[in-house]
Amino acid sequence: MNLTDLGLGPARRALGRREFSARELTLAHLAAIEALNPRLNAFLLVTAEEALAAAEAADAALARGEGGPLAGIPLAIKDIFCTKGVRTTAASRILEPFVPPYESTVTANLRRDGAIFLGKTNLDEFAMGSSTTNSAYGSTENPWKRRQDPAARLVPGGSSGGSAAAVAARLAIGATGTDTGGSIRQPASFCGITGLKPTYGRCSRYGVIAFASSLDHPGPMARSVEDCAILLCSMAGHDSRDSTSVDVPVPDYAAACNKGIRGLRIGVPREYRVDGMPAEIEEMWRSGLAWLEDAGATVHDVSLPHTKYGLPTYYIVAPAEASSNLARYDGVRYGLRVPGEDLIDLYEETRGAGFGAEVKRRILIGTYVLSAGYYDAYYLKAQKIRALILRDFTDAFAEVDALLAPTAPSAAFAEGEKTEDPVTMYLNDVFTVPADLAGVPAISVPAGLDADGLPLGLQVIGRPFGEETMIAVAAQLERAASFTALPALRAGSPAI
Amino acid sequence: MPLDRSTIRRIARLARIRLEESEAERLRQELDGILAWVEMLNSVDVSEVAPMTGAITIGLKMRPDIVTDGGDADLVLGNAPERVGDFYTVPKVVE
Amino acid sequence: MSYHIEGRDGPWEIVVGMEVHAQIISNAKLFSGAATAFGAPPNSQVSLVDAAFPGMLPVINRECVAQAVLSGLGLNAAINLRSRFDRKNYFYADLPAGYQISQYQEPLVGKGALSIELADGSTREIGITRLHIEQDAGKSLHDQHPSKSYIDLNRAGVALMEIVSEPDIRSPEEAGLYLRKLRTILRYLGTCDGNMEEGSLRADVNVSVRRPGEGLRTRCEVKNVNSVRFVMQAIEAEAHRQVEVWEAGGEVLQETRLFDPARGATRSMRSKEEAHDYRYFPDPDLVPLTLDPAWIEELRSALPELPDAKKARFMAEYGLSAYDASQLVAEAPTADYFETLAKGRRAKAVANLMLGDIQAALNRLGQSFAATPTFPSEAVGALLDMIEDGTINGRIAKEVIEEMEASGEGPRAVVARKGLCQVTDTAAIEEAVTAVLARESAKVAEYRAGKEKLFGYFVGQVMKAMGGKGNPALVNETLKKRLA
């Protein structure tokens, strides 16, 4: 058996029994990265030395019987989490030379519990994108291949595409991601893995490079619901350094996997049935509902009437916040500086050269919608519609315990597709954005393959801080789906 | 109302982003498309709705008035692209 | 008599509103744990939050909120149980995040008022529009290098209160009184040290002029005026400028101007002319600030006695004049000093000595009633007691004070060393009186002929002969008897 095939739960049990060492497990993953990353470009930076040092420490702790819940588990970290002493770029040219002298709370929590960081993964610049093609350091390749067209280079989704590809290709047991408009769930769906976006305020944003503060949700990505649940236990928790972090106890999310779903009411949001949805996605959705019914849940039609306004609302709110959040990249205190004749020139040259096209686009949109005379028509209006979207969820959760819907309107697409205009690309997020706007938790689980053999995900959306019920439903889906397909490119695969 | 080139220039100036001429025209078209698309929000009646500013309903937490940070100029200047002594530097600003 | 500027064809009235930025006294900054002390080495009081590093987040300092609430209560203002923080977006080298966290839409404190006392004894209410909390920016140093500006972020993120007045001020004098009164109140409350030289209190002044009875005309904002005197001069200068513009048939443009104290004139800030578009929006890193009414009541119950109340009490309780009472309550430590001394003594005598010779000596020494090693209240109390029990007279007291100032000795030590005890020995006084009257026989004759004001002259001569130490009452009595 290949060590890189182990999930978090099994690896943890085996490490505890000293069947192999954390060092061996880490070396196996580093070897897989060395073999595959030149092609996938999932990692922007591999921290082999630090990883091995951490593995040795984990082995020592495990030998003393003191290992934390993640002792010796090799993880990949999205390069938007600041890691002390390790370059952190948000996949932007503007942060190319940036080495944070601090650690994000989420990664600090993972380290505290013994996790080993293999390196920093690729993403759309500042998490703005759904394809991981908007990276200043090259795109990431999806390890899955179309049966009919194996040569096509597919995108892993985004923005956490590097993390999703790394986990799917078995370069890491799990990874961190951030979900602002779908950036954990959509790449999880595209790469056939599980991605969990917790409730807003559940995981601290301290040390996570901000895209849109009111929408940024750090969360775990892994190859099973249980693995995500275990990671969430470590990542979650109140943080006094984040004013939007909520002080609610962290339950044993992994235990929720076995809670069962008998008697739960599952809602089917009728507005998610959009025109032009591929038949196999509709089919998978129906199957998912049937599986849940088989396990004792009841299925109910619900309405989220403002769903269709989610995307345009998101594309006002997120750029507005981003335009302000990204003002700090000015070439004065850190990061790239392009010299200028005067201060304004320095700013304009630095930001003109340091930001990629999508980032500029969103900064300009955000600047525009906040500017004098337009604030009420765009930003204020969007925040009101956001309140209506939240109300939709609140109303629905008065009727049902969780919602089931597809994660994305399609399987992974090829690089170069959907680039004719930005709005086409934005439509990828149609099913994921509402949960971000409302701050409710959601998890994407691989539930089937399309006709090309590409993975498709279903998402379970839960009540605020209702992660346990959501996880119970997701675990049931996972058991019923028994998704065993493997990506063409993976550690030890013959395709390499 | 379609965006004109001078609006793009003004917005880029506010955002302190230098745009090449070709870039400005492409962005003008893209932004115009995005703004036309978000127009659909105008069909929603929000007259009775209070705006939402975030997903958190708890009150603002406050910290005690204790000095816990600072005291390390090198920490904050360590990433500076240019410094003189313990100052950041920028091209001279004439007031 | 109300203030007017006499124009070419009739009087002009001035309309002034003030925006005062007052640095809140706290140990740590508004949203970070870095220190706030003045004068620290560059960038030594900067957290990664203040320098706006990626992923850094603001967490508000409870003390800064409490201080702002206290200030609001001290200005008789409404405290808003819900307020909110907005971002004000603009680029500047000393604004690390590219935005300032401020309160725009929903300030912490609403309407209040402050009363000022004019020179003629009348009082006026100046309305307070609002008070809100915001971050200070860092500091740019432009004179350290030929081609670079240096940036020091020590001040970046320090808590400020912006206190906005209604346009109720009608003269430079009123503006000065308003600013002084505001400073006094904040200092009483301990919420701002009021030090304008160090920039802990800065004023922006909105000035417009109009014909009496007219509506408002265009105003100009004069930024960052850093002393009470300059505020008064800036208003005067700006108002005259505007009158000239209007009378020449021109139009006053709404703009930001700077006061140049050397020239005694304001000038346009051309560098800031580029149209600002601050793109305010609610800061998504902070949720609305909601206050518990019980906490506000707790703060209210801890409010100190404020200057207006203290003045009224000093007048009622100690029988002081309005003028003396105002002088004594201008600074809380002065008022405390007075009350310490007034216990068991004649309040009027205490006030006279404090506000007269002692104040003059303190001014020369650069000391104040808040901290004076030379004139601690015990020493001044002893001095008052010696005057009261006749050990020395008022004239000698002046000499004792000068000696205390020079040598740092206590009053009793000075009196003993210099033998300044008052002479109450009637034989000695008789002797001096006899000598003076003998010497001044011509004047005695004039006096007896009806020139009664010569009496004072004789007193002076006797005192002089006695080295100033004669008991004035006994000297008077003896002279009267002998000249009768």
Image: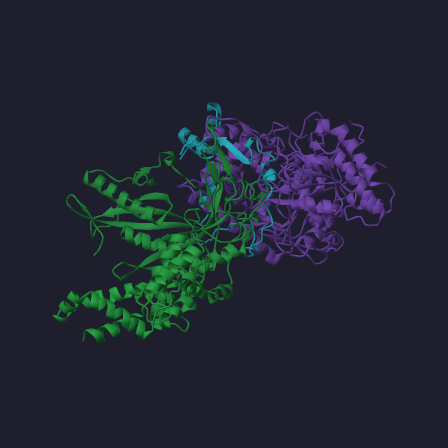
Chain in cyan (letter): B
Locate residue C237, reporting x and y percent.
Answer: 27, 43
Residue A118 seen in the current view: yes
Tell how many labels.
Answer: 0
From this view, report whether residue B21 is shown above or below residue C320: above
Residue at the spot x=39%, y=64% of the render?
A: C419
Q: Position of residue C473 (x, y in %)?
A: 29, 72
Whether A493 is drawn above or below C6: the answer is above
- Image colour for chain A is purple
Q: Can residue C112 be seen at all in this image of the molecule?
A: no
Judging depth in this view, the residue of A141 and A271 nearest the camera is: A141
Position of residue A415 measured from the top left corner of the image (x, y, whole percent): 63, 28
- From the image, which quarter does the N terminus of chain A lie in? top right
Location of residue C287 with respect to B13 vertically, above or below: below
Q: Nearer the viewer, residue A55 or A422?
A: A55
Q: Which quadrant would residue A187 be assigned to in this image?
A: top right
Q: Quadrant of the C terminus of chain A?
A: top right
Outermost residue on the left side: it is C449
With C355 as the anchor, is B16 left or right in this view?
right
Which of these two is toward me, C128 or C195? C195
Its colouring scheme is by chain
Q: Position of residue A329 (x, y in %)?
A: 54, 35
- The colour applied to the residues of chain C in this rendering is green
